[in-house]
Amino acid sequence: MTFRASVGLATVALAGALACSAVAPVTATAAAPAKLAGCGWNESRGGERAYYEHCATNTNVWIQVKRWPRSNYHRCVGPGRTNLDYDATGAWYDSNYQGGLCSHPGDTGP
């Protein structure tokens, strides 16, 4: 094998390795937002009630639910979808309320 052929093969191998390493993180990154897209507050649409999607699989957390015209409150939610009140206008994870974690989904607080 000539020097030129060896350099050519090495260049092709290096280019292939770089292409694979550049594609892998992009693919993983592109998949992550799709999974996270529905997490958190989801407003009502087309007759469907607003809900909070808790995407973690091993915790229950306190969220603060904002309502209008009624008062806001805290609610313990587990993994998955939790339908909210008909007048809910927002909801978010509240790490400051009782440490952020809770034991019994469905419990409420002021």
Image (cartoon, grey):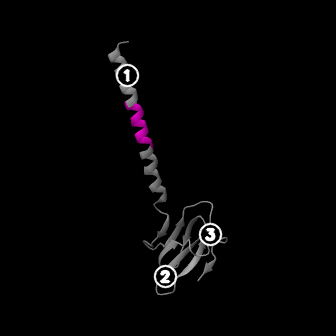
- Residue 53's x, y, as percent? 53, 66
Picture coordinates of residue 5, whole percent (x, y):
34, 17
The picture places residue 104, in percent across and down from the top left corner, at 66, 72
Q: Are the residues flagged by discs 1 and 3 in contact, CB closer than 8 Å? A: no
Number of marks drawn: 3
Relative height, residue 39 to residue 28 (above, below): below
Q: Is residue 32 above or below residue 38?
A: above
Foreground tag (1 vs 2): 1
For image coordinates 50% across by 67% down, the residue present is 40
Magenta-tinted stretch: 15-24
Asked if one can make out residue 49 in the rendered structure from this viewpoint, the answer is no
- Gap between marks 2 and 3, in whole Å? 22 Å
Question: Magenta stretch: residue 80 in it?
Answer: no
Q: How crowded is mark 3: few (under 14 residues within 10 Å), some or many (20 or more)?
A: some
Q: Which amino acid does label 1 sit on?
A: Leu
Can you identify the residue that label 2 sits on? 67
**Quarter occupied by the C terminus:** bottom right
Residue type highlighted by circle 3: Leu
Q: Residue at x 37, y 18 (%)?
A: 6
Residue sitting at x 62%, y 69%: 101
Q: Which amino acid does label 2 sit on?
A: Arg
Q: Nearer the viewer, mark 2 or mark 3?
A: 3
Q: Mark 1 points at which residue?
A: 9
Distance between the alpha carbons at the discs numbered 1 and 2: 65 Å
Residue at disc 2, secondary structure: strand
Looking at the rendered structure, which numbered label has been put on residue 101? 3
Mark with earlier residue (2, 3): 2
Q: Marks 1/3: CA distance?
A: 57 Å
Residue 24 lies, with reference to residue 97, above or below; the image says above
